[in-house]
Image (tube, rainbow, N blue to C red):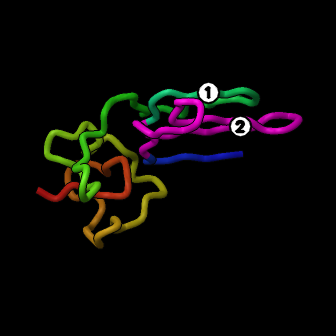
Amino acid sequence: MLSLRNTILWGNSARTGADLHAQAGPGGLTVNADHDDIGDRVMLSGTFNDLGGNLDVSPAVDKQTYHLTPASPMIDAGTCAGAPPTDIDGDPRPTGVGCDIGADEFVP
């Protein structure tokens, strides 16, 4: 089982062109997605469970720092359930009305 929460998988360049490419042996793979930004996905075997709050949009991150930009749809779109209390830079989470999707919590 693969559980994703508040994760950005968008605009990747996997061999298949998919942002999420899942293939497993007998019985397949179960992917549980909760408040993620997942672009193209290919499930060759297994099950994809959409647990809610998932997006398929450009995350609008700064291409040099990978921080969210002020126009990012990831801002306040995540879930705080199970999220760490701080982001990758040590900023408190949440900073706005909700937690952001991704490793960075946008701080204006």
Magenta span of residues: 8-37
- Outermost residue toward the front? 15
- At a point 25% along the width and 36% down the height, the residue shown is 73
- At a point 71% along the width and 37% down the height, the residue shown is 30
- At a point 36% along the width and 44% down the height, the residue shown is 78
Q: CA distance from mark 2 to mark 1?
A: 13 Å
**Label 2 Cα crowd, 10 Å radius (few <14 / some 14-19 / many 20+):** some
Instruction: Determine the secondary structure under disc 1.
Output: strand
* Location of residue 88 (image quadrant): bottom left
Dominant SS in magenta = loop
**Label 1 Cα crowd, 10 Å radius (few <14 / some 14-19 / many 20+):** some
Spot occupied by residue 3 in the image (x, y as percentages of width and height): 61, 47
- At a point 46% along the width and 34% down the height, the residue shown is 38
Badge number at residue 42 = 1
Q: Is residue 56 left or right of residue 98?
A: right
Q: Residue tagged by mark 2?
A: 30
- Asked if 51 appears above or below 68 in the picture, the reply is above
N-terminal label among 2 and 1:
2
Q: Is residue 18 left or right of residue 61?
A: right
Residue 31 in magenta? yes
